[in-house]
Amino acid sequence: MRVPYTYLEVEYMEHEYDQQVPVSVIAENVNKEFHSGRQVRNVNSIWYVISKLNNDDEWKNKLEDAWLETIS
């Protein structure tokens, strides 16, 4: 089952990657923090997000807009 990425999850991944945390550790931490320990994200998931952030300027903005709609 495909689980959509959330803005907060992507923010966390981006921050951890910028801090040079290994992607395997990022995946483990994301699963703990955002998915109740379930194995939702893996190393490939993290690389996908990093690639999207580097190549699609609007993707993160769309996630943020969707998140802001849920808290307004």
Image (spheres, grey):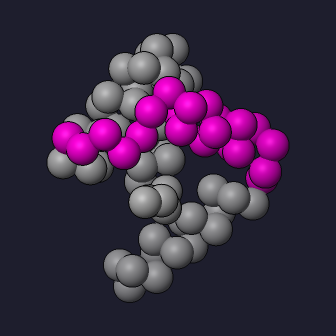
Instruction: Name the residue furthest left.
Output: 36
Confirm whether the magenta stretch covers residue 69.
no
* Residue plotted at (48% across, 21% down): 23
- Is residue 9 positioned above or below 29 on the image? below
Rendering coords of residue 47 (x, y %): 61, 31
* Residue plotted at (60% across, 41% down): 49
Left or right, 38 with reference to 11:
left
- Is residue 61 positioned above or below 9 on the image? below
Screen quadrant of the N terminus: bottom left
* Residue plotted at (26% across, 50% down): 35
The secondary structure that dominates the magenta segment is helix
Left or right, 29 with reference to 56:
left
**Camera-side residue: 38 or 63?**
38
Rendering coords of residue 64 (x, y %): 54, 65
Left or right, 34 with reference to 46:
left
Q: Could one spot residue 11 in this view of the protein?
A: yes
- Is residue 57 positioned above or below 69 on the image? above
Screen quadrant of the C terminus: bottom left
Q: Could one spot residue 7 in this view of the protein?
A: no
* Residue plotted at (65% across, 63% down): 61
Confirm whether the magenta stretch covers residue 45.
yes
The stretch of residues the image draws in magenta is 37-57
Label total for image: 0
- Is residue 57 positioned above or below 16 on the image? below
